[in-house]
Image (tube, grey):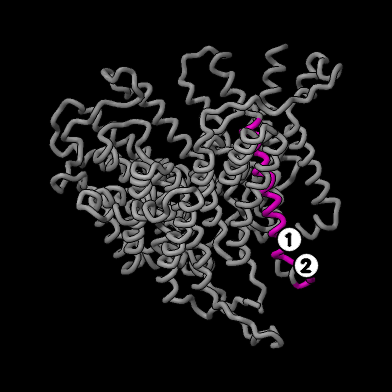
Amino acid sequence: MIRLERRPAPSRFWSYMTPVLAVALTVVAGALLFWALGYPAGAALYQFFVTPVETGYMRAELLVKATPLVLIGVGLAIGFRAGVWNIGAEGQLLMGALGGGAVALAFWNEDVPGLIVLMMLAGAASGAAYAAIPALLKTRFNVNEILSSLMLTYVAGLIISIMIYGPLRDPQGYGFPQSRIFHPAATLSPILEGTRLHFGAVIALVAAGLAWLAMARSLFGFQVKVVGQAPQAARYAGFSQPRMVWIGMLLGGALAGLAGVIEVAGPVRQLNDSISPGYGFTAIIVAFLGRLHPVGVAIAGVVIAMSYIGGENAQIMVGMPLAVTGVFQGMLLFFLLGSDLLIRYRIRLRKPGVAARPAAEPVPAVAEPRVESA
Amino acid sequence: MDVVVQIIVTTILASTPLILAATGELVVERSGVLNLGVEGMMLIGAVCAFVVTMETGSGTLGVFAGMIGGVVISLVFAVLTLVTLANQVATGLALTIFGIGCSALIGVNHVGRAYSGLPKLDIPGISDIPVLGPILFRHDPLVYVGVAMVAAVWWFLYRTKAGLVLRAVGESHDAAHAIGYPVVAIRFAAVAFGGAMSGLAGAHLSLAYTPMWQEQMSAGRGWIALALVVFATWRPWRVLLGAYVFGAMRMLELHGQSALSLNIPSQLFTMLPYVATIVVLVIISRDAMRVRASAPACLGQPFHPRG
């Protein structure tokens, strides 16, 4: 008989190891999946896990894809730590792209120095403003932020659609639903010869570093953790929970918005209907895989970026449907959540015949991220 | 008159997937489990139903396949949250992400194929009655299943001992466990039921509402169903009422543009159900005490019997 025994304190060892374990299990399950679908498992795994790091160009592409994931993931991780479930980052990303893109399009034929900075500010502000809606609804009307931020994601997609079919459509674009191409002054040019790697990657790295400083070395970081893990204690200490909701939401929204404007200024260079392949949702996985820790998120962003590049490679080289990427990402999160059990519990094999009752001492409750009714 | 009839028929049709999914989720939440993966389960149900129907030619088999698909994937959620005690919110999100990817993979060779749609009820004489005939007696079977399930769930929750036990588990799993009820087993059953109902909702989408398969065709209906459960303050009959309101929104999306003949972007109509969901949540949630009083007390909390 297998029995779970609560650990007196969460295991530090396993909290570092479960992401590794989850990735390993995903590789095994992925191999089984490829085999079941009738693809050569070896070749497919090679496409997924080796080609993305094989050449310099591919490694740069990896960082291009990791950039938005890390930016958004860092913001979400801080929010999740505080018990703020912002899952509408995809919508905030789109609004950031729209806000920054609108600035770029306003000066589509002018060489404005510093335009890119203005775009980024506009993008971050747009993302934050969009995230302010669920924050307001949560603090003022007690509306569950999971549902409101998600509904707003669908709305954001439709707003982009209205814009690129309407006011922002390229007049010379033969009616295609896309904007003009941005002026070079409104784009992030490659920082590495012969690749698409742009300055956004540096911004993402800086954001992760600053977030780490804030979480590990400031009173703010301490408040976030207390509010998330022990709301009663936080209230007693006078930490305002509504303030945390605001900060968690606005920070997540601003970083998602920044990711959005970096995407359109970097790889995309215009507004169209395929700005993001779901970075805002995938960043949720990145945040969890990175243990809600800024440094972890930076590493997890690169790991998850592999699944995008690997999926594209596998589609081209072995003809595998692109949807496999989503299956991989979902599986990874499943395995991670399942193996996280090891952090809080020991698995004990119960010897037959031994009485089942352990010592009846009170077990300290280990903090569980709070869940409110949806 | 024809227009009014048409509007009511569309409303009923559009509300059916919401009724099915929300009724299932209501039972899940009443047992104290918050499964945010409704969207993913619906998509799995939709794709399983469509693929099996296209391969076998039998809509009945397809409907069952949709249910089975929903159950299978809901059991993944059940194992993770009830056995390995994973966070329910995160696992529900994982279920949706996985469901979107997995359904796209299963349906990859079926995009663009068309199905004639589930047969509609046709009782000679009765179905031909003007007005009432088309509104009440000329739908596909799942429309009636949806309404019947609301009644059945109400009866189960409030008129049977098993229903009382399920509600007790949702209100206080420790007390229910102390009395000797198998908390985990009951929650497993509730989650599986929710999976079957979401699968059925998906089957209605891909076999009746828009008889075809398309990636992410549920378009947020799973999330709206979750909001409906809150709107209904966890009571079955109110799900029905809420679902019809949202069905009417979809109807506006379909007919609004042409009926009003206004020059506004069609996307604004598509936006309606999402905006309405937020508005409805504001109205319901404003009274924090009422939501807290009607929500199952153990909703979303992991259960681990000491020992």
* Circle 2: residue type: Tyr
Residue beneath disc 2: B181
Quadrant hosting residue A261: top left
Q: Nearer the viewer, residue B211 or A287?
A: B211
Residue A251 visible here? no
* Residue at the (32%, 37%) spot, across then down: A97
Report whether mark 1 lies on the same chain as mark 2: yes
Q: Nearer the viewer, residue B91 or A128?
A: B91
Dominant SS type (magenta): helix
Q: Position of residue A232 (x, y in %)?
A: 54, 67
> Is the C-beta separation of discs 1 and 2 under 8 Å?
yes
* Residue at the (81%, 44%) spot, across then down: B152
Magenta stretch: give its range. Answer: B178-207
Residue beneath disc 1: B186
At numbered mark 1, what does the secondary structure look like: helix, strand or loop? helix
* Residue at the (57%, 34%) spot, across then down: B276
Q: Quadrant of the N terminus of chain A?
A: bottom right
Residue A90 sits inside the magenta stretch: no
